[in-house]
Amino acid sequence: MFIATVIPLAKGAQKEYLSYFSAIDIPVGNIVSIPIRSRIIDAIVINSEEARDIKSDIKNADYQLKKIIKVKGDSPFNKSFFVACQKMKKYTVSSTGSVIKSLLPAPFIENINNLEKIKDIDNTYNENNNRHEKLIFQATPSDRLAFYRTLIREAFAKKESVFMCVPNHYDIDYFNKELARGIEQYVFTFHSDITKKGLINMYNKAIKEIHPILIIGTGIFMSIPRHDIKTVILEHESSDTYKQIRRPYIDVRSFAEILSEIQKTKLIFGDTLLRPETLYKHEKGELGEISSPLYRLPQTERQVVIDMKEETDEKGKKVFTTISKKTRQMIDTAISENKSVFLFSVRKGLAPITVCNDCGNTLLCPNCSNPMVLYGTRQITATKSTTPRIFMCNKCGRKEKTEVRCPICSSWNLTPLGIGTDRVYEEIKNLYPKVKIIQMDKEATGTQKEAGEAMAQFIKNPGSILIGTEMVFSHLRNQVYSSAVISLDGLFSIPSFNITQKILHTIEKLHNITTNNLIIQTRMPENKILQYILSGNVLPLCREDLKERRDFGYPPFKRLIKITFEGTAIETEKARGFIEKVLGDHEPQIFSAFISKIKGKYITNTVIKVDPILWPLIETDKKIIDDKLYGVLSNLPPAFSVNVDPEDLL
């Protein structure tokens, strides 16, 4: 009899290692099926030894060993991928099994026996590997495409394969179309919308192909064990889609960096505008460059800014309106020419902006001049729950009571305003009753199928109007005639320290899909972010954004770790006390004022800020993860979820 030590491949596994017995000696690296409570799950074998050699340990164990149910076969990944998952496990305060589960396509595990066996080659510590490089490439889309074409053909000439990692399958379709010409038989695309059978067939072809290949896929396909992959391209590096929204909250960009460090492969971060964290690493000399980063937004001469404070009715009286006269003229022109229009809208909080009815001023944060957002808060005790309202700045966190006056004219006549997709839809429907109008947001098109069908309708009907949120950018590849941002001010209301970057990327994406004019409606035309966007040169804005991040203690100057708890009112009150006790040394910020009631339970978030040296992505002699803090976080009860590098604080 043999005793096998395994790592369960399951999210939320309580233990890193488990032991089972088997009648046969199972090779290290094999995938097996094991019983855990009432479930049967997969696990990877990391050690196997004869029972007689550890007889005393078995006798003294306080649990009864269970039998391995089934040996499924060799793991569909190589050693370097496994080592990277082990390192990612510590960084994310999770388990190796949960990391593997999050980064490995389920069909590969379910159909191990149908997968082509990988060659016994592992490039984890191969001295013949290319010199490890990490490079940035901030340039226009056309310049990046031209470079990638040359890079791929040079790699093929050196008998090397390339992996291009992209955020979603729409990007896969785009880059496949642009890069595959002339090398179609050596390009392999992978995404989760492919059928299980299709994925297995594609995997086997990619493994068996003798010629170097180009793989274009989403992050979970970096596990594909081609030993000749020497270059990895992280395209659209700024996309928040790379960050997984469920435990263990893996950021594919971080995993790619760890994996490239282990495999000593070249890693390229590509985008029109890279993340501030990435640009800061470049400034510090941690990342090289393909060429000097370009800080210009393309085609800014086609922008038209409308000051919504100056909109008037038929009598010349200033009014609040959703659609400006200029935007209506733009829509009229497009419809008359049978062209399509996209109207972008976003809404967060109870009201993204609050304006003074007497002077038209927008209520701004005294600290950083961003709009103060009206929130409904929930104060919880064991016996009651009340819901007062407050103003809060989503950039710096400043809070104000609702009993405030207009700072310009001292008027109490303040009105909270919000422009969401529903409101835009109703107004456009009234203005253009005979035009086909399509709405795309998480409520109107909640599933991928519904979103795909809505987009198909829009493309099939020239002269139609599309109203949607940022989810449209993941589906729309065909260009539209004209676009409009219905309320740029709503973007400032998003509760994220990344708001400056979100606005920049939103405008950039709108330019990329618009052939004619782009209208930007705002009540704050003097806002500095908008002024930089209008100039086309965003370098000063990026520098100012970094300065604000340093002042407020945001990435890359601090590592953010968010702990989320969900429970009843009594449980939440106890959890807050527990967090304050165990993390008191780290000055936890507990956002108890923004607890949302979901399905009879409450959600609260705690954020701690850590020096990046004490929580590095890649550990070195000088940078080691704080063992004391790691111990506290890793020992939190399962009801507390830990999210390292969250996209937002709330």
Image (cartoon, rainbow, N blue to C red):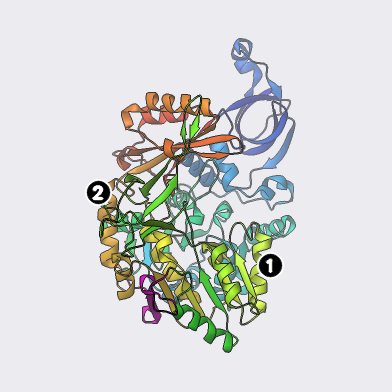
The residue tagged 1 is 453
Q: Classify mark 1: residues with Cα within 10 Å, few (<14), some (14-19) or many (20+).
A: few
Farthest-out residue, bottom: 337
Q: Quadrant of residue 9?
A: top right
Relative depth, front residue between 583 and 254: 583
Evaluate whether residue 298 shows in this view: no
- The structure residue drawn at horizontal position 36% and vertical position 70%, both measured from the top left corner, is 309
Mark 1: secondary structure = helix
Give the mark, 2 or 1, whose residue is nearer the N terminus.
Answer: 1
Query: Seen from this angle, which residue lies furthest front?
Result: 315
- Can you say whether 383 is above or below 199 in the image? above
**Residue at image x 57%, y 73%?**
428
On-image quarter of the N terminus: top right
Q: Quadrant of residue 287?
A: bottom left
Q: Which percent across, then down, holds residue 638?
A: 54, 29
Q: Magenta stretch: residue 391 in it? A: no
In the picture provided, is 532 more to the left or to the right than 75? left
Question: The residue tagged with tag 2: helix, strand or loop?
Answer: helix
- Bin the neighbour count of mark 2 within 10 Å (Cα to Cα): few under 14, some 14-19, many 20 and up: few
Q: Nearer the viewer, residue 137 or 478?
A: 478
Residue at x-position 49% and y-position 70%: 152
Could you tell me residue 270's position as x and y percent? 42, 64
Kind of residue sitting beneath label 2:
Asp
Q: Which residue is mark 2?
A: 551
Instruction: Indicate the position of residue 133 as horizontal and vertical percent values.
Output: 37, 58
Q: Which residues are magenta?
A: 295-319
Q: Is residue 269 above or below residue 57?
A: below
In this picture, residue 27 sits left or right of residue 594: right
In the drawing, what numbered circle is on residue 485?
A: none
In front here: 447 or 319?
319
Q: Residue 633 location, x and y as percent?
A: 44, 30
